[in-house]
Amino acid sequence: PSRVRAGRRATPASPQEGSFSFGQWLPGGSQEESDPVKPGWGSLSPADAHRIWDRSRWRFVEVAALAKVDIAPFAAVNLAAQHLLLLTCLLALSATVLALDIENLNIFNGTSDKILNLSPADPVPVHSAEHSRGKRASDTRPPAGRAWPKDCSEIPSGSPSGIYLIQPTGLHQLVVYCDMNETSGGWTVLQRNRRDTQITWAESWSTYKYGFGNVHDDYWLGTEYIYRITKQKVYQVRFVIHDSSGTMKYADYNLFGLEDESKGYRLRLGSYTGTAGDAMTSNNPGIVHDNMKFSTKDLDQDTYSGNCASSYSGGWWYSACYSVRLNVKGSITWGSICSGNCQASAILIKPASYC
Ligand SMILES: [Ca+2]
């Protein structure tokens, strides 16, 4: 390795140093970017070496050393160096994921290249294979003062749907699914569930508070995170329901907000439009959800004498008990359009639009 390094230190001679040019033996620029097996390497004639010896002993040593470099060991060293670089990149990758301080890594079990707003300019490389071809970790630092989007509405329009990092005010980064296709995009997905989901949904208050599931498919973002996002701006909500035949229906409320944890994450909805029916704001106090506190199996804040969350599994804004039940394994319900046999659901929010 020391002989190879000697070649890297050599620089082209300046014109006043005579007719010999180092450039005729050495690949121009950085060897990392060039093919090390280059005509001329190892074919230095004794006469050339002598000329160099006459001018500078140091240079003779350098060139003679290069002339002795055999291709095979050099290739082995180069391969080892590439592996070392790849290992360094992988270490840097895992280190920078931690350095990003993602609060809810518990719902993210993929690789960093699944996070769409991590570009090569960010601390985590998007394509590690490309990274290993010569870029150094120091090339990928983010600009100072980098601001992450506060929600999915701050991601440039035209971006694809997928997993992004957002950073609501006062929090570290969160991974979240952004729906960029649904009516002009920019929707932050709070919940996603399917009839054949792998998750049970029968979780505790603290598990609901910080989220669970898998941001790649079914998940609850976290009641506290939902509260912290909605505290930033005035939001609208879209409940997306795939009914028993798979037809997509929706219920929009032009306002969506939660009160803080000390007030039970009480739900506040605006007025309804949509095709799924206004099942969240029923006139029947026994099955209404708007203005209800959130309940889980271990924290009963419903209006029923018993414990709705315990009886029906899954945390929700129960009254006594429900007409909508989206946080459940296998029996998703939205009003009368699919009572326990909806195929899928999602809850999406974005800043309210004003006419
Ligand atoms: Ca109760």
Image (cartoon, rainbow, N blue to C red):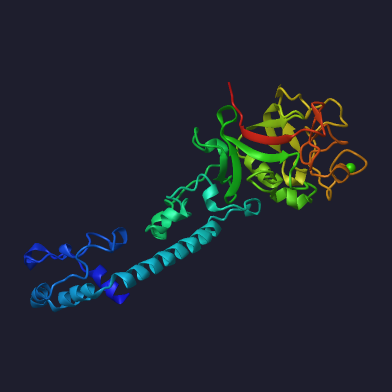
| Depicted 5 relative to depicted 114: above or below | below
| Depicted 332 relative to depicted 70: above or below | above
Question: Which quadrant does ligand 1 occupy?
Answer: top right
> At 49% from the left edge and 33% from the top edge, which residue is drawn?
158
Residue 96 in sight = yes
Indicate the position of residue 75 as horizontal and vertical percent values. 34, 68
**Lateral position of residue 173 relative to residue 300, left or right:** left
Q: Nearer the viewer, residue 95 or 162?
A: 162
Q: Tag count in the figure?
A: 0
Residue 141 in sight = no
**Lateral position of residue 121 relative to residue 292, left or right:** left
Q: Nearer the viewer, residue 95 or 5?
A: 5
**Quadrant of residue 43 within the rendered picture:** bottom left
Indicate the position of residue 124 as horizontal and vertical percent values. 48, 54
Q: Residue furthest top?
A: 355
Q: Residue furthest right?
A: 305
Q: Nearer the viewer, residue 309 or 4?
A: 4
> At 14% from the left edge and 79% from the top edge, which residue is drawn?
57
Q: Nearer the viewer, residue 142 or 202?
A: 202
Indicate the position of residue 352 as horizontal and vertical percent values. 61, 29
Indicate the position of residue 201 as horizontal and vertical percent values. 77, 46
Q: Quadrant of the N terminus?
A: bottom left
**Quadrant of residue 36 within the rendered picture:** bottom left
**Lateral position of residue 60 relative to residue 96, left or right:** left
Q: Quadrant of the C terminus?
A: top right
**Lateral position of residue 116 relative to residue 230, left or right:** left
> At 29% from the left edge and 69% from the top edge, which residue is drawn?
71
